[in-house]
Amino acid sequence: MKLQQVLSHIRKAVDDYNMISDGDRIAVGISGGKDSLTLLYGLHALMRFYPSHFSIHAVSVDLGFDNLNLDKIKELCAELKIPYTIIKTDIANIIFNERKESNPCSLCAKMRKGALNEVIKAIGCNKVAYAHHKDDIVETMLMSLIFEGRFHTFSPVTYLDRMDLTVIRPLMYMNEVDVIGFVNKYEIPVVKSPCPADGYTKREYVKEMLKKLNQENPGVKERMFTAIQNGNLKGWCRQDGKQ
């Protein structure tokens, strides 16, 4: 997938859900993975011509694993002239050594977002962009159905009133396979997650389930995404009034 195609998906999401306003300072959450780096490239390109002027600031949370190397991300941000902040934390030690969590993902996500949001406010950003794509949205819906018994997923735009911070998800119309294609085409320096739980989570289980369902029933993922759009979920009303 070419950058122009990534831009097209991002522009549609931003316009459909009014994600960006003039003067916004947007923190881009960078894990080092393919999704967040695709988002960084896309927003950097959009920033050059979008009618509402905005700026971006890349931010990573260092969980404290010894084998995490973000040097390539630093080089990329310097090349793109994007400011980059790394937040040092002791989250890995707390979760895996002190608490010895058997299901660490939920607590890790809460602690990571807490650390991220505090720094985002401190550097003067009013929005944060997360790199959730279409597959993530559908997988989250399936996880809610299977493990919580409710029809729910995160919304394109979420306002966090306690932090006075708005979360946006500009990759929401992109398929994961297209993200992979983009990263491979442009040889983007992806950093592998050092987390020992990576690849052994409930989300990974649901991801494989969705993959199989889509192979056996072509188009099922798109129909699920359409069901989410039409499901009267909070935050899913487009600017034109359509679901």
Image (cartoon, rainbow, N blue to C red):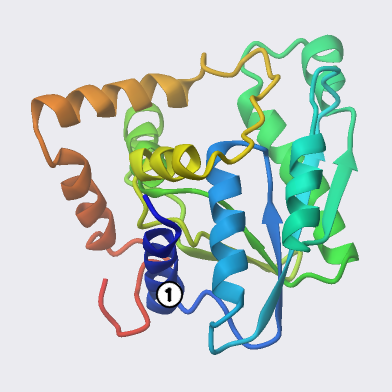
Residue at horizontal 21 percent and vertical 53 percent from the top: 227
In the image, is residue 95 above or below residue 2? Answer: above
Q: Position of residue 78 (x, y in %)?
A: 81, 55
Q: Is residue 67 left or right of residue 21?
A: right
Q: Is residue 241 left or right of residue 223?
A: right
Q: Is residue 46 left or right of residue 9?
A: right
Q: Position of residue 220 (x, y in %)?
A: 15, 39
The picture quadrant where one finds residue 196 is top right
Q: Which residue is mark 1?
A: 17
Q: Position of residue 242 (x, y in %)?
A: 25, 77
Is the C terminus in the top left, top right, bottom left or bottom right quadrant?
A: bottom left
Question: Callout 1, which amino acid?
Answer: Tyr
Residue nearest the observer in this picture, 158 or 216: 216
In the image, is residue 212 above or below residue 124? Answer: above
Q: Is residue 60 visible?
A: no
Q: Position of residue 100 (x, y in %)?
A: 76, 10
Residue at horizontal 22 percent and vertical 62 percent from the top: 230
Label 1 crowd bin: few (<14), some (14–19), many (20+), radius 10 Å: many
In the image, is residue 97 above or below residue 44? Answer: above
Q: Is residue 92 visible?
A: yes
Residue at horizontal 68 percent and vertical 51 percent from the top: 29
Q: What is the tally of numbered marks visible in this picture?
A: 1
Residue at horizontal 29 percent and vertical 83 percent from the top: 241
Q: Is residue 224 left or right of residue 237?
A: left
Q: Secondary structure at mark 1?
A: loop
